[in-house]
Amino acid sequence: MSAAHRHSHDHEDDAPASDEGMAPEGAIGTRGTRQRAAIRRVIDESPRPLLPAEILAVAQQEVPALGMATIYRNLKLLLESGAIRTVELPGAVARYESARHAHHHHFQCRRCDRVFDIHACPGDLSGLAPAGFAVEAHELTLYGVCADCGADAAR
Amino acid sequence: MSAAHRHSHDHEDDAPASDEGMAPEGAIGTRGTRQRAAIRRVIDESPRPLLPAEILAVAQQEVPALGMATIYRNLKLLLESGAIRTVELPGAVARYESARHAHHHHFQCRRCDRVFDIHACPGDLSGLAPAGFAVEAHELTLYGVCADCGADAAR
DNA sequence: TTAATTGCAAATGATTTGCACCTCC
DNA sequence: GGAGGTGCAAATCATTTGCAATTAA
């Protein structure tokens, strides 16, 4: 599999683009279909990364006949165009999030397994790599107990 | 799937244990078989995280009849016992590494896709999480160009 | 019109599991 | 001797792909 378009924070992908199009030139594919619009809307409007099955479920409210194959085909196109990013966490299938979200990292709760966005970044980590290694991007995930689960435990 | 034993740097899993057993009490399963020993040895002796197929290939030099099912069954047990950790990178199947390796992170080269260990750590990142979130561990991956590929390009 | 896109179903690949046989303790 | 392990093959699951029908431009 190609190594392109991982979910990582490139040192230059900071500009969330004007407001609409993230795609370099042209559009995602060539045409604008209801299903493609629905899929993209679901991802763009989610405050957290979604699983393919979650995207399907929500998008089907808009386009009932939508199939999983279409979800995957569009996810691939959206990834290639840079409109969305992948969020991979151990023991789970890949999740997808809008590339319009500003630079951030993730926090996964060990109790409820939910994944939260963290709008903070340790900054430049190029000093961590050995001499000769050029660091272009980084990806960070924190693990622990989220506010909800922590509150539950304290009760 | 349980969220236990992800590949992440717990704030307390720093002690690589005396020399042999990493398992809390008892052993991995209950018995010591040739295949289990071979699998563990392959992982413990590798300087980098290995794919299941790689572990199988190397371990078969010792136990020819070894099957992939046994690899997976033992990887699960080894993970549960804390003897090994998972290293998940986007677009690739999970890799496995010995938990005896000291705390470290990973660097994946975007040219050759190889994964390198980085023996450096940004340290405490608990300040990055929002109030109410308890950070227990973190996982970090750097992306860029490794020394080999960088040298090739400069040539 | 007509090439892009979709939906469904079949194909892949990775990982898991059922089961009969084997082997460590 | 018997519970724990293993090997193989079949079963799952997630993701991909073939293809005929549909649809946006």
Image (cartoon, coloured by chain):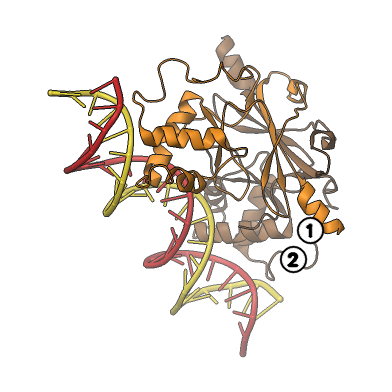
Chain colours: A brown, B orange, C red, D yellow
Q: Viewer-proximal residue, A64 or C6?
A: C6
Report x, y in % for residue A2.
Answer: 65, 58
Q: Give the residue drawn at x 34%, y 25%.
A: B31
Q: Viewer-proximal residue, A39 or B83?
A: B83
Q: Residues within 10 Å of mark 1 (few under 14, many from 20)?
A: some
Q: Give the residue drawn at x 67%, y 28%.
A: B138
Quarter placement of the C terminus of chain A: top right
Q: In the drawing, what numbered circle is on residue A27?
A: 2
Q: Viewer-proximal residue, A40 or A125?
A: A125
Q: Which residue is mark 1?
A: A21
Q: Name the amino acid type tagged 1.
A: Gly
Q: Give the residue drawn at x 68%, y 39%.
A: A47
Report x, y in % for residue B137.
Answer: 65, 24
Q: Are marks 2 and 1 in contact (CB under 8 Å)?
A: yes
Q: Secondary structure at mark 2?
A: loop
Q: In the drawing, what numbered circle is on residue B132?
A: none
Quarter placement of the N terminus of chain A: bottom right
Q: Tell me the subunit letter for badge 2.
A: A
Label 2 vs 1, first from the N-terminus? 1
| Residue A66 seen in the figure | no
| Residue B32 seen in the figure | yes
Q: Tell me the subunit letter for badge 1.
A: A
In the displayed structure, does residue A111 sit left or right of residue D2? Answer: right
Q: Viewer-proximal residue, D22 or B13?
A: B13
